[in-house]
Image: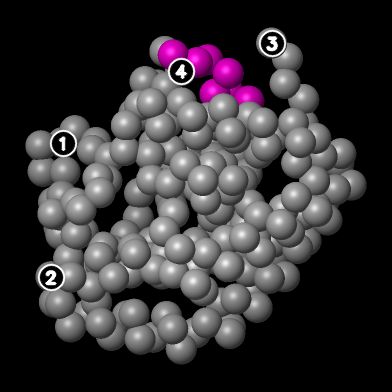
Amino acid sequence: MVITDGMNPAERAVKRAFDFIFALLGLIVLAPVFLVVYILLRRQADGPVIFRQERIGYRGRPFQILKFRTMVMDSEDEGVPQLAQKGDDRLTPVGRFLREHHLDELPQLWNVLCGEMSFVGPRPERKYFIDQIMKYNPDYEYIYLMRPGTTSLATIYNGYTYTMDKMLIRLQMDLDYLQKRSLLLDIKIMLTTAEYILFGKKF
């Protein structure tokens, strides 16, 4: 099956300009929030504030995704990648709050500013899990046509992907988005995400 991108080159350029401008504004406006979260995490005194992890992004290139650290150190001490679960006991008290309110994702504004991510797009995955997904659906390669995003329709309506079934549902939703995406759809997704966060809706 051939999957085509719903956005033309001009729309993709506008999308990238939008990402850069609003990521820069977000970093400036939300600086006080960054400071508060930094202080809370430093008070835990149990490791670094920023969590970095390699993900696969645009055109299949690896990059380091940034998050505020929400889990205890050595949360994968057996060396095997593990998916976050509901009620995961590896979360720290501050980390649980950050994750519930999606504040742990704020450092990804830097990823967006640098062009590694977009505000709207498929959530980036680790190669370990991509290899497993592609055994079921090799169309995952089409995901590389897009910059990974901080939010997406799959993020809102499919939630955390802690099973292979949910990963495959997310993939299909992301492929549907690729074919239908537009600047207007991106705005709708951003507004829905903001509504969910502001009104405490779970996703």
Task: Give the residue type at disc 2.
Answer: Asp
Earlier residue among tags 3 and 4: 3
Percent across and percent down for residue 29 are: 58, 85
Task: Give the residue type at disc 4.
Answer: Met
Res. 134 mark:
4
Provide the residue designation for mark 3: 1
Task: Give the secondary structure at mark 4.
Answer: helix
Residue at the spot 66% in from the left edge and 64% down from the top edge: 191
Earlier residue among tags 2 and 3: 3
In the rendered image of this protein, does residue 160 appear above or below residue 191? above
Looking at the picture, tell me which residue is in the foreground, 147 or 155: 155
Compared across the picture, whether 69 is left or right of 108 comes to: left
Check whether the beta carbons of the residues at disc 1 and disc 2 lie within 8 A of each other: no
Provide the residue designation for mark 2: 46
Give the image quarter of residue 179.
top right
Task: Give the secondary structure at mark 1.
Answer: loop
The residue segment tinted magenta is 136-143
Provide the residue designation for mark 1: 79
Task: Give the secondary structure at mark 3.
Answer: loop
Earlier residue among tags 1 and 2: 2
Earlier residue among tags 3 and 1: 3
Percent across and percent down for residue 161 are: 38, 39
Residue at the spot 80% in from the left edge and 53% down from the top edge: 184
Task: Give the residue type at disc 3.
Answer: Met
Earlier residue among tags 1 and 4: 1
In the rendered image of this protein, does residue 76 appear above or below residue 119? above
**Mark 1 crowd level (few <14, some 14–19, many ≥20, 10 Å Cα):** few
Q: Is residue 123 visible?
A: no
Task: Give the residue type at disc 1.
Answer: Gly
Q: CA distance from mark 3 to mark 1?
A: 36 Å
Percent across and percent down for residue 198 are: 51, 74
